[in-house]
Image (cartoon, rainbow, N blue to C red):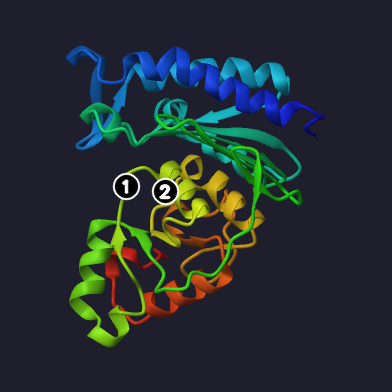
Amino acid sequence: MLKPGDSQRVAELMRETAAAELLPRFRNLAKDEIRQKRPGDFVTVADVASEQRLASGLARILPGVPVVGEEAVEGDAGLVALIGRPGESCWVVDPLDGTSNFVAGRDRFAMIVCLVHDRETIGGWILDVPNDRMAVALKGQGTTLDGAAVLGKPAARAPRGLVGYRVRKEFDRQLPPASRQRLGELTTLNCAGREYIEILSGTFDFNLYRMTKPWDHAAGALILSEAGGQALRLDGQPYQPAGRMEAGIIAAATPEAVAEARAVYEMVEMPLLAPRP
């Protein structure tokens, strides 16, 4: 599907879009350029302009392949169904991941693009915009970070995790000290794309989410899997981009980190994370 050079074209499009639509607006937004879709869920003119530019560019790379963008889905929720079509392809785009950080002037935001074919992610690109770090994976071809091949290695310490505040609170509240010490630091960057790059670079070892919007996680799941790791649903099944968004994910660049995180997670009663029937 992707021709030689197309992956590089996607990466270049992302960097061009970040330079044109995101970086000039960072710490430079007017109040009327920010709104909330729901309380605490921000969208800005930068999100919209970035998605439009990405959609136009991706249409030139693979003509006729639809784009499922986070902001477009806000206007037409039915677009998500394109991800689950047997035998068909679509792009999935988060034009500005970490919008709350962007709005607050924190330099932790990213851009995410993935290509889905026949309900599987076959290409993933994440750009850590402020630091210009690019992670890329093509199914069956491994993962690179800034052009260098990456293979996950087990950490010589308790695995450090990227989890939400409520998850961390329950781990700290419910686990006896010996069990809690099986995991290291637990925190969040409020930006899934940046978190996947930090896991890939070895700064952190795993993430854990209940809500798994495909534009946040499909690319990262492929990137960590192609680096030798795993991306599993909370019930232990492999992550798929067309799966239920509330089915959760535990992902890492090594199977060992996933196994340890799952083992500790299963010791905790966490109704907020229980997959819905």
Residue 217 spot, x, y in % from top left: 50, 47
Name the kind of residue labelled 2 in the image.
Glu
Left or right: residue 240 versus residue 205 is right
Q: Quadrant of residue 32?
A: top left
| Residue at (30% x, 52% y) in the render | 188
Can you say whether 202 is above or below 213 in the image? below
Q: CA distance from mark 2 to mark 1?
A: 7 Å
| Residue at (46% x, 16% y) in the render | 19
Residue 150 spot, x, y in % from top left: 63, 52
Q: Quadrant of residue 231?
A: bottom right
Using the image as rendered, state which of residue 80 and residue 233 is in the foreground: 233
Label ID, residue 189: 1
- Is label 1 in a helix, a strand or a loop? loop
Name the kind of residue labelled 1 in the image.
Leu
Count of numbered badges drawn on the protein: 2
Using the image as rendered, state which of residue 266 and residue 126 is in the foreground: 126
Would you call the spot at circle 1 few (<14 residues within 10 Å), some (14-19), or many (20 or more)? some
| Residue at (36% x, 13% y) in the render | 24
- Is label 2 in a helix, a strand or a loop? helix
Left or right: residue 25 versus residue 6 is left
Can you say whether 51 is above or below 114 in the image? above
Label ID, residue 275: none
Residue 192 spot, x, y in % from top left: 41, 45
Q: Which residue is mark 2?
A: 195
- Whether tag 2 and tag 1 are in contact, CB under 8 A, the answer is yes
In terms of sequence position, does the residue under pointer 2 or pointer 1 come before the other? 1
Q: Quadrant of the N terminus?
A: top right
Q: Quadrant of residue 255?
A: bottom right
| Residue at (66% x, 54% y) in the render | 226
